[in-house]
Image (spheres, rainbow, N blue to C red):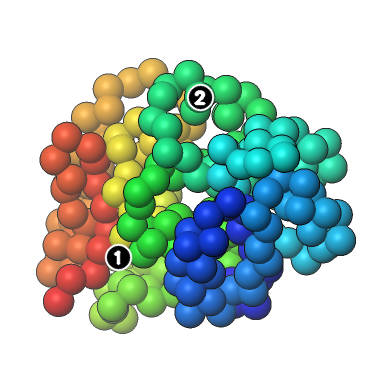
Amino acid sequence: MEGTYILVVDDESRMRKLLKDFLSTKGYHILEAEDGEKALDIFVENRNKIKLVLLDIMMPKLDGWSVLRKIRQESNLPVIMLTARGEEQDELFGFELGVDEYISKPFSPKILVARVEAILKRVYGDTKQVKDYDGITIDQEGRTVKVDGKEVDLSLREYELLKYLLDNENIALSRDKILNNVWNYDYYGDSRTIDSHIKKIRHKLGKKGKYIETIRGIGYKFEIKK
């Protein structure tokens, strides 16, 4: 979503510069804050423009949790927490407050950009109805998929699974995450059903099926490798 405003909140100037450099190359406009109080001031002044917040937890004046609480009183815009901690309790606490996703430091800037783009597409949609992934074209309005111009016959679940992988291109997705987003949270079946669906999709995509990569011990990732 080129031209989108993103608020980056981190007390480390080097981290803010790193994030700004990578996100700017994708056409995003970056607003910066070095502490929680400044972040809230910028948010209030630009609440109609900001579409996503990258928010550090440990900061002076107001920490990330306090900033998140204030934002959630007025807005449901997506928030990604940046944290050096990997403790489960912290993550659960954040999800209760309304965190959309966590990214632990140190992280790959390319992966962070990919996650930002995936969340923006999920929340705000994509203006392009037909997208091309190296010959795999997906028509979101017509809910059809073609490979090199030839339509592929996919079941509804296969289509939704493939679309989820494409929407999260270059991101490793766990089986649990796939189940929660494609089969929904009320599904209590075996996660191996994903494996059987992936196998069928790969077969139907032919040579392009190789772009669905198995990530051992995690799940799957759609990545175009030539």
> Could you tell me the amino acid type at mark 1?
Val
Mark 2 element type: helix
Question: If the image is split into quadrants, where does the C terminus sit?
Answer: bottom left
- Write down the residue under mark 1: 152
Q: Name the side, left or right, on which 99 lies relative to 211.
A: right
Seen at 58% across and 52% down, the residue is 10
Disc 2 vs disc 1: which is toward the camera? 2
Query: How dense is the environment of label 1, judged by Cα within 10 Å: few (below 14), some, or many (20 and up)?
Result: some
Q: Is residue 143 among the parts visible in the rendering?
A: no
Query: How dense is the environment of label 2, judged by Cα within 10 Å: few (below 14), some, or many (20 and up)?
Result: few
| Picture coordinates of residue 168, whole percent (x, y) | 40, 56
Is 11 located above or below residue 129 in the figure? above
Seen at 77% across and 42% down, the residue is 71
> Could you tell me the amino acid type at mark 2?
Asp
The one of 77 and 33 positioned closer to us in this rendering? 33
The one of 85 and 130 positioned closer to us in this rendering? 85
Mark 1 element type: strand
Seen at 20% across and 63% down, the residue is 211
Seen at 37% across and 39% down, the residue is 178
| Picture coordinates of residue 179, whole percent (x, y) | 38, 33
Q: Which mark is residue 90?
A: 2
Hey, which quadrant is residue 51 in on the image? bottom right
